[in-house]
Image (cartoon, rainbow, N blue to C red):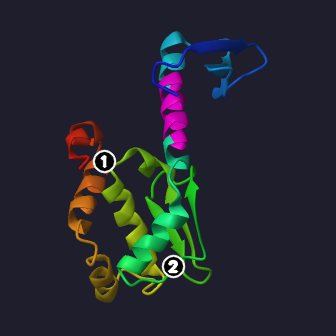
Amino acid sequence: MSAELPVRVIRSARRKKTVEARIVDGELEVRAPERISDDELQRHIGELRRKLLRRRSATQIDLAVRAKRLASTYDLPAPTSIEWSARQNHRWGSCTPATGMIRISDRLGEYPDWVLDYVIVHELAHLVEPGHTPAFHRLVARYPKAERAEGFLMAVSLGHAGELSGLAT
């Protein structure tokens, strides 16, 4: 699926507020309220396209294999489960130490591998140290690109993602 995916808009008088999209026969099918302005509709289309592309990028990465490798490399426990989450809009990842479950924001699917690896290591470290204690930070610091990844994510959070495209290696 590329950014050039053809768009088919279906406006409905019955639909009052929501705009939704899905891929149907190679097209981005967008269902929208009849009275939505063209500018507002274009904004929604752009955001929905980005979300669908992000979700597709994320699903091509096997988090379980990646987490197992990182846990072994950095002498951390492996999670009982690790999965992508489309609902994490303000966090990069989360961990439930009691169950060993880790959730990773699907937004990370579009960023460099070393950034995703950092977030996984961060969450794996929570399986040992639930809080952000000095001991926790020492565990995370075992990952050699931790500081670089933290800076990358901080810049993304501040809205500078476009300026970071050259940092893929």
In the rendered structure, the answer to whether residue 75 lies left or right of residue 36 reads left
* Residue that carries the numbered disc 1 in the rendered image: 156
For the residues bearing labels 1 and 2, Cβ distance under 8 angstroms: no
- Give the main secondary structure, helix, strand or loop, of the magenta stretch: helix
Residue 52: x percent and y percent?
A: 55, 35
User: In the rendered structure, does residue 54 fall within the stretch colored magenta?
Assistant: yes
Residue 118 makes an appearance in the image = yes
Which corner quadrant of the image does residue 151 belong to? bottom left
Q: Residue at the spot x=47%, y=63% of the render?
A: 93
Which corner quadrant of the image does residue 27 belong to? top right
| Mark carried by residue 78 | 2
In the rendered structure, the answer to whether residue 161 lies left or right of residue 55 reads left
Which corner quadrant of the image does residue 122 belong to? bottom left
Q: Residue at the spot x=42%, y=51% of the render?
A: 108
Q: Mark 1 to mark 2: distance in Å?
A: 28 Å
Secondary structure of the residue carrying tag 2 is: loop
User: In the rendered structure, does residue 148 fall within the stretch colored magenta?
Assistant: no
Residue 36 makes an appearance in the image = no
Which kind of residue does numbered mark 1 sit on? Answer: Val
In the rendered structure, the answer to whether residue 121 lies left or right of residue 20 reads left
Secondary structure of the residue carrying tag 1 is: helix
How packed mark 1 is, by other alpha carbons closer than 10 Å (few <14, some 14-19, many 20 or more), is: some
Q: Nearer the viewer, residue 75 or 139?
A: 75
Give the answer, above or below, for where 9 lies relative to 18.
above
The region drawn magenta spans 44-56
Which kind of residue does numbered mark 2 sit on? Answer: Ala
Give the answer, above or below, for where 8 lies relative to 56.
above
In the rendered structure, the answer to whether residue 135 lies left or right of residue 49 reads left
| Mark carried by residue 54 | none
Q: Nearer the viewer, mark 1 or mark 2?
A: 2
Residue 3: x percent and y percent?
A: 45, 24
Q: Residue at the spot x=56%, y=56% of the render?
A: 84
